[in-house]
Image (spheres, rainbow, N blue to C red):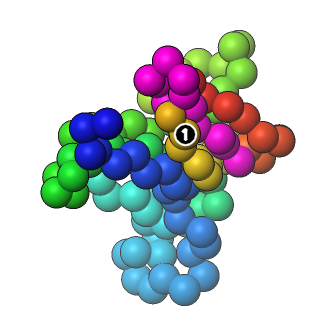
């Protein structure tokens, strides 16, 4: 063990009702996430965020994922109709040293390895 830490969670905007002004307009339009490279998505549409930090808490890597069936286009070129909620809940180290992430999917439970 190198002392690093892996964290998993869902990332998204719960709802737009409490926002005002341009924040609310952007939220309703699916543009509430202002991070560089963020994909437009409606409020309530979650993605999974998994990060790894070193023992001091400095970011080593981060990854954002969302389940999509094999017939859907990649997230970056998808439409709102293709996007479903997918929130990471737990990250576990596997016996081969890899990671498994338990996902809370809009249509059930998922496992990402």
Q: Which of the pair 66/23 is nearer the observer?
A: 66
At mark 1, the secondary structure is: strand
Q: Where is residue 62 in the image (x, y as percent from the top left)?
A: 33, 40
> What stretch of residues is rendered in magenta?
94-104
Residue 69 locus on image (x, y percent): 71, 21
Left or right: where 2 falls relative to 99: left
Extreme top residue here? 71
Residue at image point 46% right, 24% down: 98
Residue located at (77% from left, 46% from top): 106
Q: 9 or 20: which is nearer to us?
A: 9
- Is 26 left or right of 113, judged from the image as shown? left
Q: Is residue 102 magenta?
A: yes
Question: Farthest residue toward the right?
Answer: 108
- Which residue is farthest front? 1
Please identify the quarter of the rendering in which residue 31 is found: bottom left
Q: Which residue is drawn at 21% across and 57% down?
A: 57
Q: For residue 37, say whether it is visible.
A: no
Q: Is residue 78 magenta?
A: no
The one of 18 and 63 positioned closer to us in this rendering = 63
Can residue 12 be seen from the camera position used here?
yes
Which residue position is annotated with label 1? 92
Q: Is residue 39 left or right of residue 45?
A: left
Position in image of residue 52 (x %, y %)? 32, 43
Q: In which quarter of the image is the N terminus?
A: top left
Rendered residue at 26%/45% (across/down): 3
Q: How crowded is mark 1: few (under 14 residues within 10 Å), some or many (20 or more)?
A: some
Q: Quadrant of the C terminus?
A: top right
Q: In this view, does 34 lie above or below 6?
A: below
Who is closer to the viewer here, 21 or 38?
38
Count every numbered label the image shows and give the total: 1
């Amino acid at each position: 063990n190198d002392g690093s830490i892996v964290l998993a969670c869902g990332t998204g905007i719960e709802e737009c009702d409490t926002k005002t002004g341009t924040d609310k307009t952007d939220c309703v339009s699916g543009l509430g996430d202002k991070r560089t490279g963020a994909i437009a998505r409606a409020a309530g549409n979650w993605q999974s965020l998994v990060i790894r930090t070193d023992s001091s808490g400095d970011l080593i890597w981060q990854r954002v994922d969302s389940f999509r069936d094999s017939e859907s286009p990649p997230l970056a070129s998808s439409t709102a109709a293709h996007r479903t909620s997918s929130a990471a809940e737990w990250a576990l180290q596997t016996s081969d040293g890899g990671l498994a992430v338990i996902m809370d999917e809009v249509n059930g439970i998922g496992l990402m390895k």
